[in-house]
Each structure stands twice: as structure tokens, then as C-alpha cells.
Amino acid sequence: MSRATKRQNLAYEQSKRPTNTKVRTALIIFLTILALLLVGATTIRHFLPTEEPPIQSNSWDGVTPGYVLTPKLNQQLGEPVRVQNLPAEKQKVFYKNDGFKIFYNEVILNKDGVVEFIKTPVSYDESNLFSNYITEHGLPDFELYVPDAGLGKKAYVYLEKGLVYVAHEDKPVIEQIWYFEPTDRNTFMLLWGTSLSEDQKYQETFPF
């Protein structure tokens, strides 16, 4: 190869180097900016206030079925007593109830942290009668016995309200309240009413 040809090849290679360097520099700058944007978006999203769920007839202490249990609500509810893993990556979370030492408020969450169901024991108060809720909501869609809550205990179910009131059929003082997303009877019975019965056969276990 002649010297002239070598010089031409060298000049050609040298002419490509600035272009390659510019491309690499531009790529590094682009990737750096992209990384900064991603970090910034994550930081902003972290500090933005999380929208709290609406307060509805089926809300309990600000917790509403069908909505995420937000950090604010988690702080409000306090540290769980225990957490039980359920099928389909769901969890049942037990929280203290001020009126009871051994019975707890139960919140069932799906894998995305969305509240599906709430069950709370209610302190005995002779003025807290089921008839008060009939005045507020009208007659229930149906009523069934709750064998595992004790003899003569009935669940009064409001499907469109997403509420169940549990009380004794003779002296209907409210003992439990259940909260769920409004649904139809078949879905309710499949998901939350499996322990309910048309007869009042007594079982020793209590659901809390």
C-alpha cells in the first residue's frame, strides 16, 4: 500500500472519530436527562397527597370498600394486631377495637391494597337498636341467622348500601356491622354470606 493511500485511510478514520464522539456524548446526555426525569417524577409522586376515599354509608372510620387503604388511613387505624394471609393474595388485617379486648375490627384487602370487606364488633348499647337503622335505610333486602355469632342472632342485609347489621332477633341491639361494596344477593352470599343460615343452629366459635 502506498504512503498516499495510507495517509488517505488515516485521514478518513480521523474524520469519523469526532462524529462517533459526538454521538456518544449526545447519548450520555440523553440517558442522564432521562434518569433525572424518572427520579424527579418518582419523588414528586411520593410527596403528592394521596386522594382519600369518599365517605359513604358503607364507610367505617374513613375506610371505604372499593378504595385503597391510604397511608393516612393506615396511620389513623394504628398498628395491626395481626395479619392473616388469604387465598388470591388477599389479607385479613385485624385492628384493635376500643370497646373490646379480645374481639377486633377486621379489614380484608386484595393484592392491590383495595379494601373489599370490613367487619366490626359493636359495644353493647341498649339505645343502639336495629329499628334506628330501619328509619334511616328502610327495610333490609333480606335477613338470615348468623350461627357463629350466637343463638338468635340475625344479619340484616342492605345490598345497595353495602351494609349488614347483626343483632338479636328478640332484642335487636346492634352487635356487629359489616361493610362491603354494594352488590347483588348472589355475589354477597358467595363472598361474604357463606356463614349465614336460614336456621339458628348455634356454633361455639365467634367470627372475630
Image: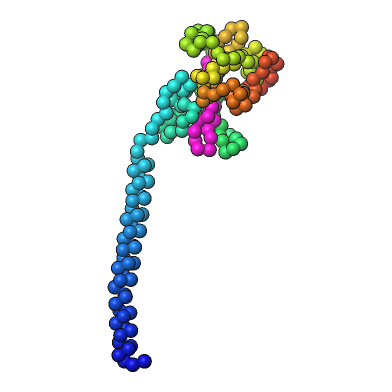
Residue beneath the point at 49% across and 12% down: 137
Q: Is residue 13 above or below residue 133?
A: below
Q: Depth check: 127 or 196 in front?
A: 196
Query: 173 above or below 188?
Result: above
Residue toward you, 195 or 141: 141
Quadrant of the drawing holding the C terminus:
top right
Residue 134 visible in image? yes
Q: Check residue 72 for magenta coloring.
A: no
Name the side, left or right, on which 41 lies relative to 168.
left
Q: Is residue 107 magenta?
A: yes
SS majority, magenta: strand
Q: Quadrant of residue 139?
A: top right
The image shows residue 50 at horizontal and vertical percentages of: 38, 35
Q: How is the image coloured?
A: rainbow
Residue depicted at 33% across the width and 93% down the height: 2
Q: Is residue 93 visible?
A: no
Image location (x, y in percent) of residue 66: 49, 29
Against 30, is 127 above or below? above
Q: Position of residue 31 (x, y in %)?
A: 35, 58
Left/right of residue 206 with respect to residue 108 in the rendered view: right
Near-viewer residue (9 or 124)? 9
Measured as percent of width and height from the top left, residue 131 is found at 52, 8
Q: Nearer the viewer, residue 3 or 144?
A: 3
User: Which span is picked out in magenta?
Assistant: 105-123
Q: Most extreme residue toward the right, as rendered?
A: 201
For image coordinates 48% across by 8% down, the residue present is 135
- Going 35% across and 46% down the picture, which residue do you hit? 41
